[in-house]
Image: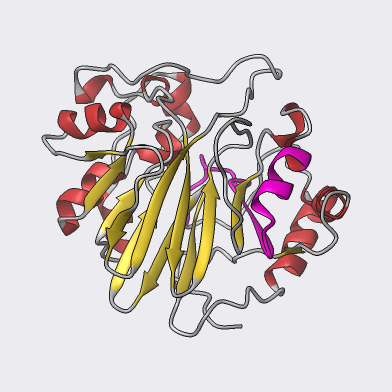
Amino acid sequence: MPDDLTALRELERVPLGLPAGLELQWLGVAGYRLSFEGTTVLVDPYVSRAPLRSLLLRRPALPDLAALDRYVARADAILVGHTHWDHAVDAPALARRDGATVYGSESLAHLMRLHGLDSVVAEPYRAYEIGPFVVRFVPSRHSKLLFGRKVPFDGALSCEDLHGLHPGAYKCGDVFGIRIEVAGTSFYHQGSADLRDDERIDPVDVFLAGITGRQVTPHYWRRILPRLDPRVVVPTHYDNFFAPLERPLSLIRRVALTELPAEIRAVSSATTLAAVPRDPGRPRATSGG
């Protein structure tokens, strides 16, 4: 997909304009690290990268401790928007390693209990203070990736044994968009391209937008952008999450990054489109301009 990769490289050169000292690192898939004044928050961290055969052969998808130590900095809190494997696999191991507090759905709490750990079941719109960060969970929806008709692996995570946690056992659970405020800047992280039109979504500065599935969600940008009114849209969840991080970046099929600028301009001419590079061998943080 050379055209999409070329479009991505151009977006990576666009500055985000974040305040000095605020770091934003893309971990791949929908995962991010935000750090400010000595506090680090992770959102949907997933670096263990279960191979495709784990899905096809129903083999366990569990944290890769070596990958976590190599790629993920110590965290104070972990936020999980839904419990598909490419969003939730690594949360328990990181919580155990760092003593981090984990926030998410009832399905996430079930997953954490399987690992012998606790978590906070998020109350919609409640403000959670994590050092200089204020976090709120907004009820949302997962895109219907299966031909626009069905959410993959829908329902609540109910597996009762770690050895049964193959990728398909990581059911979606409740879905949240996550609003994060820090250093006078607001972010909205949406791990999947759909939303609940009746939920309150306040304007933000930076929209971390999971773009896979946007094509099967009716009028997605027209429904979400006027409500968020973001200064910057940062696309995410477009990389091939079966490929190990050691390999060069490859993209999901039909992700259509070349079409993104026109899609955004058709709804909001004042919104900037930018991307955060993925550099796993040498973790890269984007701060300031």
Relative to 198, residue 249 above or below = below
Instruction: Look at the image and say whether residue 223 sits in the magenta stretch.
Output: yes
Q: Residue at x 19, y 20 (%)?
A: 161
Q: Is residue 43 visible?
A: no
Q: Is residue 239 left or right of residue 166?
A: right
Give me the residue at 41% from left, 62% from top.
33
| Magenta region, residue range | 222-245
The answer to whether residue 231 is seen in the rendering is yes
Closer to the camera in the image, 50 or 122 = 122
Q: Is residue 236 left or right of residue 265?
A: left
Residue 37 higher or lower than 98, as above or below = below
Identity of the residue furthest to the left in this view: 116
186 on left or right of 231: left
Q: Up-down: is 244 above or below 76?
A: above
Tell me if residue 78 is in the magenta stretch. no
* Nearer to me, 196 or 272: 196
Image position, residue 87 (x, y; %): 42, 40
Please identify the quarter of the rendering in which residue 162 is found: top left
Of residues 249 and 235, which is closer to you in this image? 235
Q: Position of residue 54 (x, y in %)?
A: 41, 27
